[in-house]
Amino acid sequence: MDHIETRELRYFVAVSEELHFGRAAERLGIAQPPLSRAIRQLEHRLDVRLLDRNRRGVALTYAGTVLLREARAALDTVEAAVRRTRRAGNPQRPLALATKAGASHETLRRLLDAVATAPDAAPIDVILCEVGEQAGLLRSGHADAALMHHPFDDLAGFDTEALYVEGQVALLPASHPLASRDRITLAEAQNVPDLPIARWPRLDGSYPDGPGPKVGTQSQLAQLVALGKTLLVIPASSRAWQWPEHVAVPVVDAPDVTTVIAWPTSSRSQAVAALVRTASALYGTTLPVPTG
Amino acid sequence: MDHIETRELRYFVAVSEELHFGRAAERLGIAQPPLSRAIRQLEHRLDVRLLDRNRRGVALTYAGTVLLREARAALDTVEAAVRRTRRAGNPQRPLALATKAGASHETLRRLLDAVATAPDAAPIDVILCEVGEQAGLLRSGHADAALMHHPFDDLAGFDTEALYVEGQVALLPASHPLASRDRITLAEAQNVPDLPIARWPRLDGSYPDGPGPKVGTQSQLAQLVALGKTLLVIPASSRAWQWPEHVAVPVVDAPDVTTVIAWPTSSRSQAVAALVRTASALYGTTLPVPTG
DNA sequence: CGCTGTGATACCTATCCGGTATAAGCCGTT
DNA sequence: AACGGCTTATACCGGATAGGTATCACAGCG
């Protein structure tokens, strides 16, 4: 009665995504009848109707939508387990460190230099990712640790060690009137008519309303900044995109950004511990860990 | 090569916990040879040695310890998926609301009264639990929502709505010298020689050092408070344990406690949403969500 | 009324899971 | 060194069940 297998969950997810037994079976590489039978058996074992087989197709019941969400999460967890185990089984595996492509250049350089000279440190693979990708890479076991930024990144479920705190600056073309100011406010930065702040997609892929240009990747943003088409408010040290014709003006009331090194709470790896130790030694003092 | 089944993970966890194929097989209700074969096959599919079969027994390799931890988490997630789906499939299921046995009595009473009169609200099963149990119940799908206390409880991974904020008080026997004060400090409360603060077990079951009595459940603590054997610092409204011969003295510098209603981030349930709406309506204003 | 597209059913095959019997390896003992 | 025990691995068999093929049942639609 209990003891669902991942195979059944995979099958259910496929059918739920295709809403079509034939296509789902094809995707799974099996024939349609066994798939129908497997789903039926799953429903029986859970004692719950998961799908409405209407004329012309399939629809999820409410319980089906719940299982779809939960099954995806469960399958992700299993996959992460496999990935972490495989990584752990490789003795000379390098540590995978995820970091945003544009930010923390200086931190990363110092960290890599320190690791290179540290006797107990494993080699490091740097994974450059887009905004917000680090959390997923950590959760899925693709990365062992990540440089992240509080309060921008979602640190839930990770252990973190704060490395340093800094204010934020607005990047402006040197010719812009605001560029001569020695500091501006967040409200001013958000209401520059000729330099609207870029819009990032939401989780569902749609864009919020507003005047700013739509961007999906950091390179797109870098392009827009270089062209002087958008205003950027970023941590003071993230100057990777600052071109000679740009000026960085401190934004006084923007929230401070804490750069942290994060790793999965469960991780007991020697190598990760050594990396964290190296990183925090670089920044000397123990800062209060940001929570929330 | 990929596509591990939960059965394999269950088998591996059993062997890892018993460190003995025979006993593990017995626990699983199968014979020993198929279990050996299953583990061997798992190792082969992961391409990782998980166990050292030494003379006289079995030991986990490093990769094995990683998989043990990850497999437990994965199995928990699968179980939670099953449980949530089953609950979702039962249309007239009551909502399970987890709450600490001793705290939030008044909140709970008001909430239940409000729910009883609300037209769109499902019936509620209250699950009274020990300190810190709510998070596990929410994660495992045993509970749909929980009353929790920031910053005491771990809210990571949950959505929350703050209900109210309050200060903390120290509960003292009326005869105690400090009882006549109209307020005390945390430092004072923590250094009362004849009323040491009780010690709770850590996650691993061991107790921190200190003079206070060891407690494991809230009823034990209640007993000690009633006997005047320990000093308690608790949210001002949690007077469930306040006996007539006790006095509550505000602790001025103790952190404020926010009572929140929490639910799994993934939950899209109508019933949970209605409950949260009812709860926050009771407390009128929208408080800032506590972070950190 | 057929035609088309869908999921369900029937039935067969093959995989593989689990059981029994037994071998092989490691220890401590004599 | 041989033996008895304890534990895991191997060999082999039977049965459960996953998966394949063929076909049915049913709904929409021209």
Image (spheres, coloured by chain):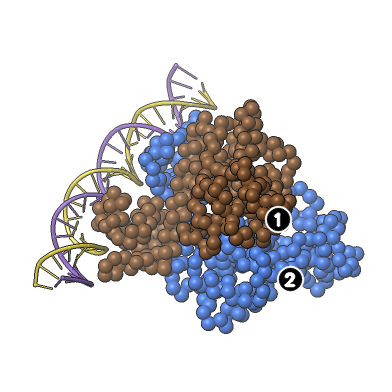
Chain colours: A brown, B blue, C yellow, D purple
Foreground of the two, B169 or A194: A194
Q: Is residue B87 above or below residue B56?
A: below
**Whole-number angstrom distance, CA of label 2 to CA of label 1:** 44 Å
Task: Write down the residue under mark 1.
Answer: A184
**Residue B11 in view here:** yes
Q: Residues within 10 Å of mark 2 (few under 14, many from 20)?
A: some
For the C terminus of chain B, the image quarter is bottom right
Q: Amino acid at mark 2?
A: Ser
Foreground tag (2 vs 1): 1
Mark 1 — on which chain does it sit?
A
Where residue B153 appears, as percent x and y from the top left, is: 65, 59
Query: Which image quarter: residue B103?
Result: bottom right
Query: Which image quarter: residue A40?
Result: bottom left
Q: Secondary structure at mark 2?
A: loop
Q: Amino acid at mark 1?
A: Ile
Q: Secondary structure at mark 1?
A: loop
